[in-house]
Image (cartoon, rainbow, N blue to C red):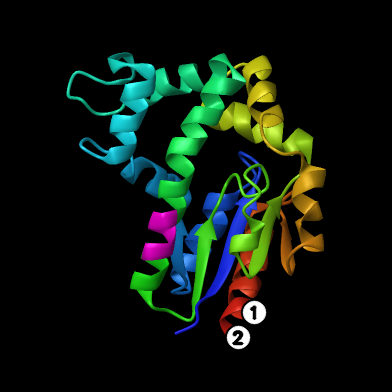
């Protein structure tokens, strides 16, 4: 069965999770790349062994699982570290994604890909959905959700692709933009309408 592969992306705190919940209620198959990213670095995996070979046991917890905070610090230290981590993890994540899609054997799957634009992965998908909100709303929601200071929140936002870059996805793929600047019930209605549209494709 040919599966229609749809990437769902959006900036941090723009509302991707809310959209995913509504898609799930509509029985749309969902794959989350963040979940896969955690699975490929579980204890005794090849990816974890390679990370430890590069960065040492300092990135492990006492139980030999990955210390995510330690790895994040290594990642932000310099671009070279980031490149090594990406080269180790990305092929394994994408391979597992493909295997999971094939296992599902459904006509349509939505894959949550937070870094779709940053990693230039649009060529792996047939369509895209961008959950979009303006920078002020994004900052406000992030501060509230993470309980962090404004400087860190702005750093986290600027580490991602810009809003303009995400919206430019429509030049590469058929793209639905879900604008999320208003009340939550309006967003839910838009997501519900989009779910129906996708199921009818």
Query: In the image, residue 120 lies at what x, y percent?
Result: 66, 49
Magenta: main secondary structure: helix
**Residue carrying label 1:** 197
Query: In the image, residue 25 lies at what x, y percent?
Result: 45, 69
Tell me the magenta residue range: 95-99
Q: Is residue 54 above or below residue 177?
A: above
For the point 48% across and 59% down, the residue is: 21
Q: Nearer the viewer, residue 72 or 48?
A: 48
Q: Is residue 65 left or right of residue 191?
A: left
For the point 24% across and 29% down, the residue is: 65
Q: Secondary structure at mark 1?
A: helix
**Residue carrying label 2:** 200
Q: Secondary structure at mark 2?
A: helix
Res. 89 image quadrant = top left
Q: Is residue 113 above or below residue 189?
A: above
Query: In the image, residue 164 lies at what x, y percent?
Result: 82, 45
Answer whether residue 147 is visible to the viewer in this image.
Answer: no
Q: Nearer the viewer, residue 160 or 50?
A: 50
Q: Is residue 57 magenta?
A: no
């Amino acid at each position: 069965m040919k599966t229609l592969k749809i990437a769902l992306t959006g900036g941090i705190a723009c509302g991707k999770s809310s959209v995913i919940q509504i898609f799930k209620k509509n029985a749309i198959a969902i794959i989350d790349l963040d979940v896969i990213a955690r699975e490929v670095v579980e204890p005794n995996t090849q990816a974890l062994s390679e990370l430890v070979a590069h960065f040492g046991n300092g990135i492990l917890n006492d139980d030999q699982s990955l210390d995510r905070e330690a790895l994040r610090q290594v990642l932000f230290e310099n671009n070279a570290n980031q490149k090594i981590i990406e080269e180790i993890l990305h092929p394994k994540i994408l391979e597992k994604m493909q295997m999971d899609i094939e296992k599902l054997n459904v006509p349509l799957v939505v894959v949550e890909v937070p870094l779709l634009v940053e990693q230039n992965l649009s060529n792996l998908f047939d369509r895209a959905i961008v959950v979009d909100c303006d920078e002020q709303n994004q900052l406000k929601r992030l501060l509230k959700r993470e309980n962090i200071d404004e400087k860190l929140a702005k750093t986290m936002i600027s580490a991602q692709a810009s809003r303009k870059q995400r919206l430019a996805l429509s030049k590469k793929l058929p793209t639905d933009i879900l604008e999320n600047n208003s009340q939550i019930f309006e967003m839910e209605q838009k997501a519900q309408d989009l779910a129906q549209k996708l199921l009818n494709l």
